[in-house]
Image: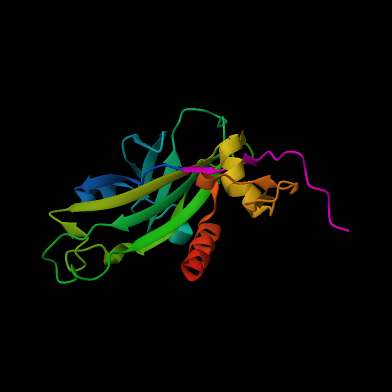
Amino acid sequence: MSPSLPSGVSVSTVADTVSATETHLFKIEGYNRLRDMHGTVRCLESSRFQAGGHAWRIRCYPNGDAAANAACVSLYLLIDDGLQVPAKDVRAEVTFSLVRHPGAPASLLPPCRGSFAFTYNKVEATTRSRGFPRFINKEEIDWFSGYMRDECVAVRCDVTVVEKTPAKEEEEEVVQARDEEMLGLACDCEDELCKRHHATAGGLGFRHAFIKLFLRCFQA
């Protein structure tokens, strides 16, 4: 027994909103002197910058963020909206890269790069930063690698913010043209007794329109 046809169809949609990827360049001049001044667990912090409608800071630990990471450089991205608890979930897709200066022996090699994604929400409000405790061995930051020139090291950070939009109800025309066909409810027959919802000529799916054109060619 076939299921009865509904008298109407409504559709609601939840979608993601993706911001444009934005880039911040964090330059550290006098890197070796600053590294010697900062022991383990002490960081160099970028200025506050905007990306995807939120404020962020980069934290660089030139001697690691813990004793176990003292041989490495640690990099983190901190959300800095000034709120103790976010009003809504904030998901960030992040890529850190060390910028190679042109002309170095290794300047043609791919840069040291790392990517991650994290969601900052009410449940994890105490964790405001994510990153890499061992991004690169600190001895690899030198002239040969191209990561340092004239005592300057540059960190590139690409941030894409993804947010969820509230559920919204589709307009009737969109429901008929796309969703009713998906549900198998739309019909383009000419039977006046047919109980299905009939698509308008402008709302026919590409597949149905192509079939009708194909058959018409053989009937000519």
Q: Locate residue 118 relative to residue 19 in the image: left or right.
A: right
> Above or below — where is 122 with respect to 214?
above
29 or 12, which lies in front?
Answer: 12
Quadrant where the N terminus sits is bottom right
Residue 185 is situated, as x and y percent measured from the top left of the image, at 69, 50
Look at the image and give the residue range highlighted in magenta.
1-17
> Above or below — where is 26 with respect to 115?
above
Residue 70 seen in the current view: no
Residue 104 is situated, as x and y percent measured from the top left of the image, at 14, 67
The quarter holding residue 53 reads top left
Question: Which residue: 28% across, 47% down?
Answer: 37
Question: Which residue: 75% across, 47% down?
Answer: 193
Q: Is residue 162 magenta?
A: no
Residue 173 is situated, as x and y percent measured from the top left of the image, at 57, 38
Q: How many marks?
A: 0
Residue 56 is situated, as x and y percent measured from the top left of the image, at 40, 38
The image's colouring method is rainbow
Residue 164 seen in the current view: yes
Question: Which residue: 31% across, 57% down?
Answer: 97
Q: Is residue 12 magenta?
A: yes
The quarter holding residue 95 reads bottom left
> Above or below — where is 11 with respect to 87?
below
